[in-house]
Image (cartoon, helix red, strand yellow):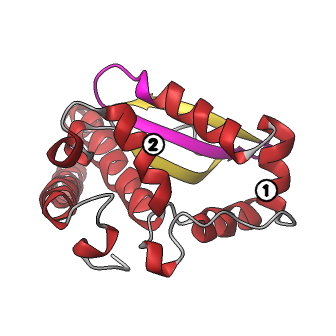
Amino acid sequence: LNYEYSDLEPVLSAHLLSFHHGKHHQAYVNNLNATYEQIAAATKENDAHKIATLQSALRFNLGGHVNHWIYWDNLAPVKSGGGVLPDEHSPLTKAIKEKWGSYENFITLFNTRTAAIQGSGWGWLGYDTVSKSLRLFELGNQDMPEWSSIVPLLTIDVWEHAYYLDYQNLRPKYLTEVWKIVNWREVEKRYLQAIE
């Protein structure tokens, strides 16, 4: 991480981050590495059936790692600019205003749609390289949008482990608060890279 666990307080506690990053995300990394090793062994043995049976574990754990990796980069302490929106001349600001009218409208829609995810999942803002536009996604479990045309800009984790220690069952409250530490500089950087 580019910050200490305590740096995101009071929005996310160090206690929560130590579990979320240190245990949950690490488990995806460990399981992903183990899956890669099993695929390599099965490939060496030319065991197509074994390789096929490992695909769901590969997808789930790779999604868990990538979604979390983006999420951690999408957060920043308030003292380091967390929550500060890009200025009005930013290409990202212009794209958000063109699509949703304002950051406030975008965040309200994002929160409404993401809060409605049944069970665990992720809210995503992505750039669609085909339509050349911003898109919102609500994805269950560790799913990700189709990578061939969607560039990830922002993810918000709504698995219970992302907020439960601090917000209990109040997912909408967590979604309201997390914007105070969104690293908009990182989101904007990804957007600028996507539109090049």
**Magenta-colored stretch includes residue 161:** no
The residue lying at 29 percent from left, 40 percent from top is 60
Q: Which residue position holds label 2? A: 176
Residue 80 in picture, x, y percent from top left: 49, 80
Residue 172 in picture, x, y percent from top left: 39, 32
The amino acid type found where label 1 is placed reads Thr
Give the vertical position of 126 relative to 82 (above or below). above
Q: Nearer the viewer, mark 2 or mark 1?
A: 2
Q: Between marks 2 and 1, how big is the CA–CA gap?
A: 20 Å
Residue 31 in picture, x, y percent from top left: 16, 53
**Quadrant location of the C terminus in the rendered image:** bottom right
The residue lying at 52 percent from left, 26 percent from top is 112
Q: Is residue 46 left or right of residue 19?
A: right
Question: 126 or 96: nearer the eye?
Answer: 96
Residue 157 in picture, x, y percent from top left: 37, 44
Question: 130 or 33: nearer the eye?
Answer: 130
Q: Give the quadrant of residue 34.
A: bottom left
The amino acid type found where label 2 is placed reads Thr
At mark 2, the secondary structure is: helix
Q: Is residue 23 left or right of residue 63?
A: left
The answer to whether residue 143 is seen in the rendering is no
The answer to whether residue 42 is seen in the rendering is yes
Q: Which numbered dot is residue 165? A: none
**Magenta-colored stretch includes residue 131:** yes
The answer to the question of whether label 2 and label 1 lie on touching residues, with beta carbons closer than 8 A, is no
Q: Which residue position holds label 1? A: 93
**Quadrant location of the N terminus in the rendered image:** bottom left
Range of magenta residues: 115-133
Graded by Cα atoms within 10 Å as few (under 14), some (14 to 19) or many (20 or more), the crowding at tag 1 reads some
